[in-house]
């Protein structure tokens, strides 16, 4: 499937537009209902307007707690195509009921419609994400998820604005009624174009016991540790995002002394920023799940929310709330908008890889139930966010203080994420630095196995060979390096984060050498990729040195495929020894910056035929030395 044709693919566009119109419809309905309650000061059962608005959010999210477990089971048991069509047909019925509520301005009917709309979204959710791996090839999943996230946030933005505009014009309830019915019908038509898919687990018995099935679903979501961590990461994002969106109106009114037009601007920037971040994430990922973007995105969230806190109250304003034009002329406002855009773009970096990772790593037979577990925890974290925010305000904190609280909490989350997947951040940073220094090409990337252990062997040209290999190879690579590199300031921390395996010569430290071989064997046993430079030293003349027998010891102990590689273009660089000691000929930097570097990867060798001498000969041939 061509990358630029995915958006128009008959296997993708129906689900994209189905979810787009659905997300837009949800927000047209919800925002129109909230504004109707707010400006007409409706009351129900003695509740105040503020309580009624809060109740709207609670009623919409309630079905995610009580029905996600069952909807996840159903999505695995029946055809997802049929389930999506059913949910869109249900949406038309619910919107028909909602129009009665709007036209009669009946709050009980509107609240019932809102609950049913949440139920419809609960049923649709597991199918929405678990259907993508069945429709798309794995290499298209990152792009597919990026487009879905982009579409979702743009639909939320458009729906919120349209709902607010239509309900405010004459005969607004009539316009809203017509709009939600039309949007639901368009979504249903799009769903009818979905490819027909078979059920993945037709024999599954659906457990209707809500408590037991919810607990079982959560256990399924926890069964794969890496998937469970990803679910917690997504749930944290919704905690963080829900808190931000909740305090924007208060921040705009109390701190910036601005009106609702500025709140709309904030919402627009946040939604568009997440969409942009999702697409940038896809560009960086290059058809693979780039989990390195997750800690990178989390660190970015810390930076921008801290700067919002440091901005404090940028100006003093009294009297009537200022409008958008006046707001933009105040000092510091563009920094605030810059921080908001940064927060939203980093959010896209954060969630797209995690959603894709869950889809890839979850078994096809339980994927919908894993997504359902994710939805349950997302809802729990969002409700927790509301409770925490209420508690913070009750303690006397203002919205700027909340930014500091979010910074501290997110910093802790960032540290935890880094400890869980440090090698992914390490690899991503290698990609960024490598592309800043060189124009990198890779030949034979398909020879790297998608799963399972392998040993990579390569010629040793410079002190940044590891960086180029890390940037080119899609999977995380565990490098074997001389222990002295671990003692280098900053780089030592960097290498330890990348789980580099330190080694020493037998005459230097025999005990450390033995530990290194033990660690290599354990790493390969865990199905990871190990890379070493069998020459044991960087070349002084640009030619390949004799390979040491350590490679044979490794593959005799761990008989895994061996993949020869050759690096081209680094000889003569600032980090090579062509001009004397590496890193001393500064005039070379400008001459070789962004020069062409190529990594050639040969087909895997069986461990039985891989010897130090044969591998040396192979790499010399790849370099043109033989």
Image (spheres, rainbow, N blue to C red):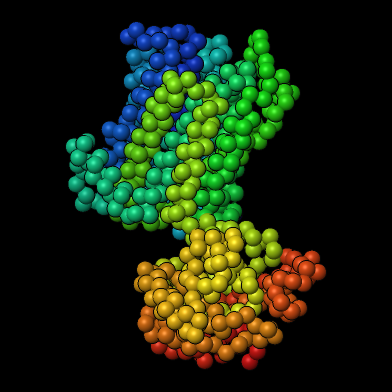
Seen in the picture, residue 311 relative to 194 is either above or below; the reply is above
Residue at image position (36%, 43%) is: 374
* Residue 3 falls left or right of residue 88: right
Q: Is residue 281 or residue 413 the one in the foreground?
A: 413
Q: In the current view of this chain or complex, which residue is farthest to the front?
A: 508
Query: Percent position (x, y) of residue 298?
Result: 52, 45
In-front residue for pair 286/81: 286
Depicted 108 relative to depicted 475: above or below: above
Residue 380 appears at what percent x and percent y? 35, 34
Residue lying at 66% horizontally and 86% vertically, measured from the top left: 543
- Rendered residue at 44%/81% (across/down): 510
Q: Is residue 536 left or right of residue 363?
A: right
Residue 186: in sight, yes or no? Answer: no
**Where residue 541 sits: x, y (%)?**
70, 85
Q: Horizontal placement of 375 versus 179: left or right?
A: left
Residue 357 screen position, x and y as percent: 43, 53
Q: Quadrant of the C terminus?
A: bottom right
**Residue toward you, 26 or 441:** 441
For the image, the number of numbered tags is: 0
Does residue 568 appear in the picture of this structure?
yes
Vertical comparison of 441 with 171: above or below: below
Q: Nearer the viewer, residue 176 or 284?
A: 284
Query: Which residue lies at the image location 38% right of the left edge and 31% below the top edge?
Result: 384
Instruction: Work out whether 208 lies above or below 456.
Output: above
């Amino acid at each position: 499937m061509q990358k630029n044709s995915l958006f128009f693919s008959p296997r993708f566009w129906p689900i994209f537009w189905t979810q787009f119109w659905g997300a837009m419809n949800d927000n047209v309905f919800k925002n129109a209902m909230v504004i109707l309650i707010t400006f007409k000061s409706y009351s129900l059962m003695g509740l105040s307007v503020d309580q009624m608005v809060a109740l709207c959010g609670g009623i919409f999210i309630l079905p995610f707690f009580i029905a996600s477990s069952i909807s996840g089971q159903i999505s695995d048991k029946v055809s997802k195509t049929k389930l999506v069509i059913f949910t869109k047909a249900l949406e038309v019925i619910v919107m028909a009921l909602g129009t009665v509520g709007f036209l009669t301005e009946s709050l009980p009917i509107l609240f019932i419609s809102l609950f049913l709309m949440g139920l419809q979204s609960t049923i649709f959710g597991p199918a929405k994400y678990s259907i993508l791996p069945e429709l798309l090839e794995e290499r298209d999943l990152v792009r597919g998820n990026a487009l879905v996230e982009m579409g979702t946030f743009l639909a939320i933005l458009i729906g919120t604005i349209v709902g607010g505009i239509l309900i405010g014009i004459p005969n607004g309830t009539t316009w809203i009624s017509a709009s939600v019915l039309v949007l639901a019908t368009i979504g249903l038509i799009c769903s009818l174009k979905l490819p027909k898919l078979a059920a993945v687990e037709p024999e599954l018995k659906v457990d209707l016991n809500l408590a037991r099935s919810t607990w079982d679903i959560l256990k399924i979501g926890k069964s794969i540790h890496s998937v469970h961590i990803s679910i917690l990461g997504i749930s944290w994002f919704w905690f963080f995002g829900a808190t931000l969106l909740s305090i924007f109106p208060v921040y705009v009114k109390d701190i910036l002394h601005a009106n609702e037009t500025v709140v709309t601007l904030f919402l627009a920037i946040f939604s568009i920023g997440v969409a942009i971040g999702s697409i940038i994430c896809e560009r960086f990922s290059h058809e693979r799940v780039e989990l390195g973007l997750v800690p990178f995105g989390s660190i970015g969230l810390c930076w921008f929310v801290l700067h919002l806190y440091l901005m404090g109250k940028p100006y003093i304003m009294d009297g009537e709330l200022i409008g958008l034009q006046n707001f933009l002329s105040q000092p510091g406002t563009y920094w605030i908008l810059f921080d908001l855009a940064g927060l939203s773009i980093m959010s896209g970096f954060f969630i797209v890889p995690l959603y894709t990772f869950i889809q890839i790593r979850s078994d096809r037979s339980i994927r919908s139930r894993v997504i359902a577990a994710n939805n349950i925890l997302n809802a729990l974290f969002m409700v927790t966010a509301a409770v925490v925010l209420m508690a913070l305000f009750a303690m006397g904190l203002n919205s700027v203080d909340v930014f500091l609280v979010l910074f501290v909490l997110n910093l802790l989350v960032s540290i935890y994420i880094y400890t869980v997947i440090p090698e992914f951040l390490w690899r991503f940073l290698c990609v960024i630095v490598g592309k800043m220094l060189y124009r990198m090409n890779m030949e034979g990337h398909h020879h790297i196995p998608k799963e399972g252990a392998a040993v990579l062997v390569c010629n040793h040209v410079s002190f940044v060979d590891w960086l180029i290999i890390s940037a080119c190879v899609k999977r995380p690579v565990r490098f074997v390096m001389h222990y002295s590199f671990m003692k280098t300031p900053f780089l030592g921390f960097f290498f330890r984060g990348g789980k580099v395996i330190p080694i020493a010569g037998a005459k230097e430290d025999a005990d450390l050498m033995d530990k290194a071989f033990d660690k290599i064997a354990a790493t390969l046993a865990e199905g990871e990729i190990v890379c070493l430079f069998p020459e044991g030293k960087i070349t002084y003349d640009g030619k390949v040195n004799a390979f040491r027998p350590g490679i044979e010891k490794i593959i005799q102990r761990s008989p895994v495929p061996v993949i020869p590689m050759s690096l081209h273009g680094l000889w003569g660089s600032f980090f090579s020894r062509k001009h004397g000691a590496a890193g001393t000929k500064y005039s070379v930097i400008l001459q070789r910056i962004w020069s062409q570097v190529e990594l050639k990867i040969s087909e895997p060798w069986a461990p039985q035929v891989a010897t130090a001498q044969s591998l040396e000969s192979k790499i010399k041939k790849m370099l043109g030395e033989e």
